[in-house]
Image: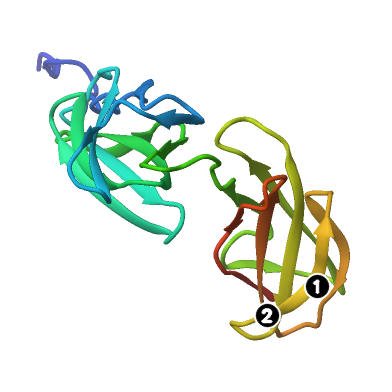
């Protein structure tokens, strides 16, 4: 009896190629208001408010942008979405702000955040400007730390680029912490004693040579 040779078609295996992942949106480059400058180009709406134009460079793989603006006096942030690379908003005058832009795409959940810039929306009758609120660097809001002591650090800056005179640091276990150090020149306090299983609250008051002050807002951290 003759042997029958059976051969399969198409080779011994198969491969499947999935759909390629969409490219994530790219980070934008901010344009205006410029970093650390007085915003003098807005249109006055009233004695307390003016309209301020924001602009940034368009980014690749992006369908829309979230413009996030934080009032540095109240620590309140607002978000406005737009498909354009420019937006004009009405803001309080005589107020410092921080802003950044988040690039978004309808094809992916990935986003990209720009750098954060600060500016001062000026108003009538201002001769000197309060410094920007101190930017807390460590411990950050909600951070968990270990050990029996902690180093408190922050950075300070002024609207006009002038020097900061000193800082007051408040620290404690309540939401109204007592003063820890006053009129210090450094932007840190090292070796602050802490206790495990405790939540601490702290803030920094920045003071310039004209006597103007700003408040960082209250930060908290816990000790493991």
Residue 76, image x and y in percent?
37, 59
Residue at 48% from the left image edge and 27% from the top image edge: 35
Count neighbours of disc 1 (C-alpha within 10 A) and say few if under 14, some if 14 to 19, many if 20 or more.
some
* C-alpha separation, residue under disc 2 versus residue under disc 1: 9 Å
Residue on which disc 2 sits: 177
Q: Residue at x 78, y 70 (%)?
A: 146
Q: Position of residue 88 (x, y in %)?
A: 19, 34
> In which quadrant of the rendered view does residue 120 lie?
top left
Q: Are marks 2 and 1 in contact (CB under 8 Å)?
A: yes
Q: Residue furthest right?
A: 191
Q: Is residue 112 left or right of residue 178?
A: left
For residue 197, side relative to residue 71 (left or right)? right
Assign the C terminus to one quadrant of the image: bottom right
Pinpoint residue 176: horizontal percent, then vertical percent. 62, 82
Q: Nearer the viewer, residue 2 or 42?
A: 42
Q: Residue furthest front?
A: 125
Q: Which residue is mark 1?
A: 180
Q: Is residue 180 above or below residue 2?
A: below
Q: Residues within 10 Å of mark 2 (few under 14, many from 20)?
A: some
Out of 129 and 148, give the one closest to the viewer. 129
């Amino acid at each position: 009896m003759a042997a029958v040779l059976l051969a399969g078609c198409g080779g011994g295996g198969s491969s499947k190629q999935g759909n390629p992942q969409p490219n994530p949106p790219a980070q934008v480059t901010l344009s205006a208001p410029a970093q650390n400058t007085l915003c003098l180009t807005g249109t006055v709406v009233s004695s307390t408010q003016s309209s301020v134009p924001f602009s940034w460079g368009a980014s690749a793989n992006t369908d829309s942008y979230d413009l996030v603006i934080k009032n540095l006096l109240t620590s309140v942030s607002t978000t406005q979405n737009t498909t354009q690379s420019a937006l004009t908003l009405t803001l309080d005058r005589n107020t410092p702000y921080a802003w950044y832009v988040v690039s978004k795409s309808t094809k992916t959940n990935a986003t990209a955040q720009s750098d954060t810039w600060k500016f001062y929306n000026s108003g009538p009758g201002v001769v000197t400007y309060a410094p920007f609120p101190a930017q807390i660097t460590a411990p950050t809001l909600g951070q968990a730390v270990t050990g029996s002591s902690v180093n408190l650090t922050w950075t300070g800056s002024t609207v006009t680029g002038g020097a900061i005179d000193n800082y007051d640091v408040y620290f404690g276990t309540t939401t109204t912490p007592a003063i820890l150090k006053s009129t210090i020149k450094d932007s840190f306090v090292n070796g602050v004693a802490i206790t495990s299983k405790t939540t601490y609250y702290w803030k920094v008051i920045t003071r310039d040579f004209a006597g103007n002050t700003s408040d960082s807002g209250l930060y908290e951290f816990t000790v493991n």
